[in-house]
Image (cartoon, grey):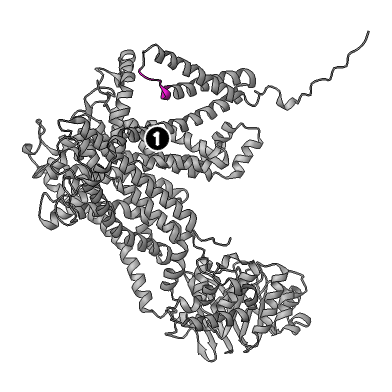
Amino acid sequence: MTTAVAPPIKAKQRPGDRIFSTATVVAGSLILVVLAAVAIFLVAQSLPAFTADESAFKGGITNFWDYVWPLAFGTVWAAALALLMAVPVAIGIALFISHYAPRKLAQSLGYVVDLLAAVPSVVFGLWGITVLAPALQPLYSQLVEWFGWFPLFAGPVSGTGRTILTVAVVLAVMILPIMTALCREVFLQTPRLHEEAALALGATRWEMITMAVLPFGRPGIISAAMLGLGRALGETMAVAMVLSPASVISFALLQSQNPSTIAANIALNFPEAHGVGVNVLIATGLILFLITLAVNMVARFVINRRKAFSGAN
Amino acid sequence: MSTTLTAAPITNSLTAGMLPRRASLWLLLTSFAVTGAFFGVLFAAGITNDFNIVGTVFFGVLLFCLLIWSVSRAVEGSRKAKDRLVTALVALAFTIALLPLISVTFTTIVNGLPRFDMEFFTHSMRNVVGPGGGALHAITGTLLITGAAALISVPIGLLTAIYLVEYGRGSLARGITFFVDVMTGIPSIVAGLFAFALFALITNDPGIRFGIGGAVALSVLMIPVVVRSSEEMLKLVPNELREAAFALGVPKWLTVLKVVLPTSIAGIITGIMLSIARVIGETAPLLIIAGFTSSMNYDLFSERMMTLPVFVYTQYMNQGSDMQAYIDRAWAGALTLILIVALLNIIARLIAKFFTPKIAR
Amino acid sequence: MSKRIEVNDLNVYYSKFLAVEDVTLTIEPRTVTAFIGPSGCGKSTFLRTLNRMHEVIPGARVEGEVLIDGNNLYGPGVDPVLVRRQVGMVFQRPNPFPTMSIGDNVLAGVKLNNTRMSKSDSDDLIERSLRGANLWNEVKDRLNQPGSGLSGGQQQRLCIARAIAVQPDVLLMDEPCSALDPISTLAIEDLIEELKNEYTIVIVTHNMQQASRVSDRTAFFNIAGTGKPGKLIEYNDTTTIFSNPSVQATEDYVSGRFG
């Protein structure tokens, strides 16, 4: 038998089909173009900043890197603190919704947590400065009084409560919903058989969770944390409003001298910036973009290495 | 001598060493009673200005964790005690999440209501330095800019989603999927900087501020959300419906337009509404590229344009001599913003609930 | 309205995997032909090549030719969309469009192609098609209600009405009764008997009684093992296949010794 290879069947193209499919390809490619444009335009507008001389900066800073370093530190420090607070709470909430709350209630409870995501960041900023900071200030005074010997809680205490710790609390609240949603999703994907196997061995619910749910969900928790970190790094308004910034590098949580974050610094200074000052701010934005990009890439990598589940929303 | 026959109490060996069913509930109530009494005394003694509800709930739950652990450990053993403790902690985590939500809502309503009046919705801030004035210019700006952003993002996002689900194969589709994920992680302020950098170069105006730039910045944030949610919805359309249409001799593009899209349209609209709700509260990018002003501006393509989030921000950050007037306006703006977002969310859920076609399973 | 189908040396692939090998058969007009065989032997795959539905799956392709009244479906420049208008198909599970009413479902093939139709014409077409599918009396009072409100058997007859509304020459049915209860199955089988007068019908079925009840000719497909291509083993009059098959494998299958 001779196997005559038939030419591949070509479907006749209708104009409607061609126009429509081309439109979808163009739209999809446009996304790639936009992302490339973001990178290119940011780089193009940043270039003058890297070579800027002293006149572009205030307060005896001589070059761009000296300028951006405290900001980058503040960004990472505030986000890390927020993450430290948010992760255990997010895992707890996710477990509560997936394994503890009554089945009928679970969905509406999840919706309640999602409501937090609906609050605009500027409102969180207002809330942080008018409610949270004054509420936490007495606590801060006590902490400094009792634990002042501990470097993180070193005095003198801020009189307004507008410290980096308050910022971190606000950030933690803001990143809770996305982290909770992701953790909940992975916890619910735990194979039922594993859970039942653990329960059949006589495990209590908590033992079942440590034996089956948490090991299964670990990559999901990690990636949720990374995505939350990405959000916290880029959050602008809450930080800009709550923090009283200074150009320092300090780990102290409760003083009135706090390192600012890149995003907040841009928001506070951009309206009045001119000349090369604008380029400097855009360059700091580029640094922020790179940091968040790296964090998100790691998160996506961890997610994709496991199963595909959507991280958006 | 008579033997009295007493019915032996029926005991089930499996219930031995267990706390009674309602024990944890009673312990919780006791804890609240104790902390409530504590803060009540503080209030009565005049040490605190008002009754501390947050403290009562928070320390009550904390006390409960401690109580349930020690009681359960004494009665039921350490394994069970740990289980009870974790249950309490997990519930505590949920309460912690509720506290800021309740607090934010409460303060916004209380502080926002004083200026939540007609004047607020019918006046701009033009020539207003003290009390009075309103956010009409900001509300108009927010609607214009968000509307323009939706006009840009919805076609691009929806078509991309259609490409990914109906056409996309191979490396382009994989690349788009990956970069859409990357785009979801772009910080909002970077999107604002991008729009600024773009238009500053195009118009050669290093101080460019206008509404459409804000719309472009918001689109960068909105497109990936629209793509993701629409993609999910399109994937939910059963393949059988596509095949049914193909078998009737319907071309692919008409199948997508007239069968796939109508079947998933409720979910897609829900996703779009939620994405609008998400970007409508964005402040940072608009602060950068749309700027702020106290006057009305209906023209997206020239001059600064105020938006509601930026209004809240500037009112609070640039307080004039009559501070309270500015703070009140900021809170009223925040309340308006939250109401708009809540409304969008509710409409989105209602659409999803009532217009999703029943797909036979 | 009814046409002859000739298949010559047809090989069907999923990417590199050869799913059906070297099928040659002729289907006469106004007959019912049944494809039987064990699961995975490629009967459904083969059926889908008869109206070019096979290539909807990414990577799927076909070698060889399928002639309908002498016109090769796989000839150069043939539009698969036009092919599918001539060769209708009914699927395993009833799949009415959930966004359309019963009436619109019947008109779907016409309306989705942007053809304009007067109200009286479309009403005629709806009635004619639904009568053709033995469904008219059950649904004539609720044409504006969604099709998903019907029972499974009614939905499947609605899908048949939808398929015959575009006036095809051939009707392919891919296990049309496998998701239905016995009474609905009987209704569909009666319908097939009637439709035979106007259409060439090809039906894939797992149910050998059904094949023997409704079909004039039967084709038996089989595979040598997993990963091997499916082949046409025997093709003959239904009575011959079930009473006096010439191949041992066919006899084993129809007598229930395997599969």
Task: Determine whether C244 is above or below C40 in the image.
Answer: below
How many badges with numbers are in the image?
1
Query: Tag 1: residue type?
Result: Leu
Task: Determine whether A176 is above or below B185 in the image.
Answer: above
Task: Determine whether B340 is above or below C30 in the image.
Answer: above
Q: Residue at x 67, y 67 (%)?
A: C180
Give, as a single range, the part of the protein colored magenta: B49-55
Q: What chain does badge 1 belong to?
A: B
Which residue in the rendered view is the most extreme toward the top? B1
Q: Based on the picture, tell me whether residue A237 belongs to the magenta stretch.
A: no
What residue is disc 1 on? B101
Instruction: Please state the horizontal and vertical placement of residue C39, each as a whole percent of the image.
Output: 65, 68
Foreground: B117 or C221?
A: B117
Quarter placement of the N terminus of chain A = bottom right
- Kind of element beneath mark 1: helix
Foreground: A180 or B349?
A: B349
Displayed quadrant of residue A21: bottom left
Q: Residue B126, can we see it? A: yes
Task: Determine whether C229 is above or below A157 in the image.
Answer: below
Left-right relation of C3 to B128: right
Left-right relation of C208 to B353: right
Instruction: Please state the horizontal and vertical placement of residue C43, each as a whole percent of the image.
Output: 62, 75
Q: Based on the picture, tell me whether residue B51 belongs to the magenta stretch.
A: yes
Q: Residue at x 58, y 70 (%)?
A: C142
Left-right relation of B15 to B205: right
